[in-house]
Amino acid sequence: MESLALGVVWGKSAEKGGGSMHLLLGHLLDTAAVGELVWDRYLAPVIRERLDAVSDGQGRALFALVCGLHDVGKATPAFQMKDDGLAARVRAAGFDWKSVSPQQGRRWHHARAGAVILRGYLPQVGWSRQACNWVWPLVAGHHGRIPGRDRLVNPGVAHGVGLWPQAQQAFVDRVAADLGVDLPGLGEARTPSRGDQLTLSGLIIMADWIASDHTHFGGLSDPTKVSMAAARDRARKAWEELGLRGGWRRPNLVPVDQHDLVRHRFGKAARAAQSAAVELARDMPGAGLLILEAPMGEGKTEAAFAAAEVLAAKVGADGVYVGMPTQATSDPMFSRVRAWLAAVDVEVPIGLLHGRARFNPEWAALRSQISFAGVHDDLDDFGMTDDYGMGDAFGLGDEFGVDGEGRAGAAARSEAPPVGPAAAADWFLGAKRGLLAPVTVGTVDQLLHAATRTKHVMLRHAGLAGRVVILDEVHAYDVYMAQFLFEALRWLADSGVPVIVLSATLPPALREQLARAYLQGALQCRDVDLAALPTPDGYPSTTAVFTRGGEPDFAGVSAQPWRPSTPVNVRILDEDDAFDPRTVAAAVTRAVGDGGCALVVCNTVRRAQDVYAELAAAFGADVVLLHSRFTAAERAHRTAEVVDRLGPPGRTGAAARPRRLVVVATQVAEQSFDVDVDVLITDLAPVDLLLQRVGRLHRHERPSSDRPANLRGPEVIVSGLRLTGEDVPRYPGGSRAVYGDHLLLRAAALVADAAKGPGWSIPEHVPGLVATGYGDAPLGPPGWADALAAARTAWEGDEARRRVNASAFLLAGEDRLGLPTLAGLHDNGTAALETEERVAAVVRDGEESIEVVLVRRAPAGGYLTLSGRRLGPSGEVAVSDDAVLEEVVGSVIRLPAVPELTAAARATLTPLPGWGGDPWLRRTRALILDDQHAATLGGRDLRYDNNLGLVVSAGNR
């Protein structure tokens, strides 16, 4: 009777089997066969080595077996009763159930049932309790959530009584036998690290999803056609047709005799800081954390790429993930990574990983030859259903921004794919799969989400394992985001993943926290000894953090910057308590009215708009406004234009440096903004951010004749700060709202000292200024003491509150370090996150904001694009016309994070009726403007001005 079960128990209905029911045994063998290919053709060497190490070289057999047993819980009445017709067939064969209600069946999920089967049967065939304890959560969690042992209470009849236990055991035996594995012999496998277990959990899901694609694995209802040989043939054909592969091959990495890897890869001799970083990576005994601190323009990125090659070759990694602060910084980094990979392995698959990647021209060109494969699961990347109930098969879309009709990048066409690494195979580009591509570049949120207790988080870990992780601009993370970074570092260290972090302005406390988090993961203990962590004695510097013999170990090296330090004059703009933008405009006019290039950085969009408005009349086309409330296309255009005009000298085809130009910007000028200005006027900000802004001042080496005579010495003019005697400094309320009093007051003290003295020596003074600005040493005159103390107390309380808030979403946290298995990982899981914005809000603190597309209502009815092109009566033209779609997508804008605006947008804004045919548009809210480009939302008047961007003001009430 047990063998009869193998021929009647079903695994997929005809609907999910491509028109024919698929026997459970067929699906189990299909998945096992795919698992073998995942092992042979996808996994990085380090993953195979780590699993072999705990199974006495039987890692492949063990992995394939667990893949094959993932759905064994479907051999229960609770699952078999889901389809009336198929259920009758099973019951007719003698596998009956009585008194099982549909509600009981629904409550007993087959993933948990599979765990119960394995926990009961594997010890009977000789498996150790230790091996059973870490294997069952992999089966229990293959639908994305790993339950605790208390959720595995056998419900009796719904799980199966009578002949059912023997039938369930028969499936286990048959899968093992067909794979040719020694089932009892695998029972002594030792417990891998929890990081490795989470990786395996994600890889099992990967194998299951590939084997669930009915276009390649059609249903087999005839048991005579089900065999391991047939499954392997199906799996091989599917693998090849899908174009799946792993990352680069070890022989393609750095030659062992290559002294200057930077020159070898990038054609220029390594600078001292770059050589030091690469050599420190060579000296590390294995995986670890490498912290590169260097001034803006020092070549940190190239150093990180070279160090990544060294570490990859050392540990057996086969790819990288590069995490950037924003989508805007991810796009240029994608181009740089592709250029580097072209020298490493021209065939390595690469992906651009953010929500609007579809509209990046370079990515679109790569994707143009690849069709899209849908996701064989009912939810999107974060476990969400379609926000508008429009039947979106792709939920909220995929991370790569690829649509479902093979129109990848339709709004960003290119004539031919650029030379270099190819786009990742289409399978990797579906929802939830982004990080599984061997090389990815994207927003750091992708990594931070791997630190959250959310559904299918293990897929992210499967993608990060076997890679080298590079994180840029880590100083940009606030205390809330940093908690997710620390949690990610703990899991990455536990999985043996090397991590490289880059910063120009890293506070010493953050350096220590990064080291602590990585060592906590590597040693699986909360308290780690950081006494030997070196304090950099120079700048640039590189710090290595790793373990040796089960103990923390460190190394550090400093180097000379490639350019000598330059004295920067610091001056405070004399402003009144109103902080009138006309005062800033007057300072700009005095500085560059007769020529020169100036950058003005304001702390709020409103202040930037006001300063620009004051300058526009006098400067005309010589002043440019740049902030986050322009549409995406306009912001990209303005950014590219400014970088072209103020970028490095000597670039082929670059615009000539203008005689006069003023750029009025917000914080968008702090990151990945490679411009060189003659004078900087900036609102007071925390000192590390001030120094980021100073990094745009005299950034490039150029002939002195390129600069006006009065601006050949670098000067920063600090605005938004009023000092009178020993009175406590004053600054605009907008600055306080953004940064708080504590860091602003400490920065004000440092600025005041510099203004009274010789200024700053950059980059020499950078580490000391950052350490002091974020330290606790007294600053400022005695009259400031009470205000500084009160501000610090408030800041410490707020920091503590935000740390606690973040802890509610962490994947495990410090308290679970050292646990042996994944059991209960998703206990107390996070609340449902219904929208993409709310997912982002989990790892980025602050008020939620909403992204919308700006369209206009046509006077005669229907809709227009922002520029006036017709969209049709319901907006349908954007779905059929790629040029119109490009313009619509370019009109995306993020609303200010004002609770009333966010609530109103969520409640009232939806896609246009005709957008249902495009996967991106049908999940995008439209903000409909009148013929004056205005609308009212949430009690606010909104107006889009082509020169100012989105202007927000209080509505008439």
Image (spheres, grey):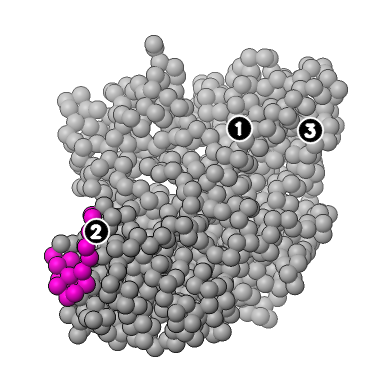
Separation of marks 3 and 2 at Cα, in angstroms:
73 Å
Quadrant of res 905: top left
Query: For the residue labelled by badge 1, is the local secondary structure a helix, a strand or a loop?
Result: strand
Residue under the image location 74 percent in, 30 percent down: 792
Name the amino acid, label 3: Leu
> In the picture provided, is 389 more to the left or to the right than 126?
left
Q: Nearer the viewer, residue 287 or 51?
A: 51
Measured as percent of width and height from the top left, residue 734 is found at: 59, 24
Q: For marks 1 and 2, give the CA distance.
A: 68 Å
Quick check: 121 left or right of 874? right
Per the image, the residue denoted by label 3 is 750
The answer to whether residue 173 of the structure is visible from this angle is yes
Crowding near the residue tagged with mark 1, few <14, some 14–19, many ≥20 C-alpha atoms within 10 Å: many
Please name which of the two marks, 3 or 2, marks the residue nearer to the observer: 2
Q: Amino acid at mark 1?
A: Val
Quadrant where the image shows the C terminus: top left
Q: Which label's residue is closer to the chain start, 3 or 2?
A: 2
Magenta-drawn segment: 85-102
Query: Which residue carries the number 2 mark?
Result: 100
Residue 560 drawn at (x, y percent)? 79, 57
> Can residue 602 be found in the magenta stretch?
no
Disc 1: which residue: 601
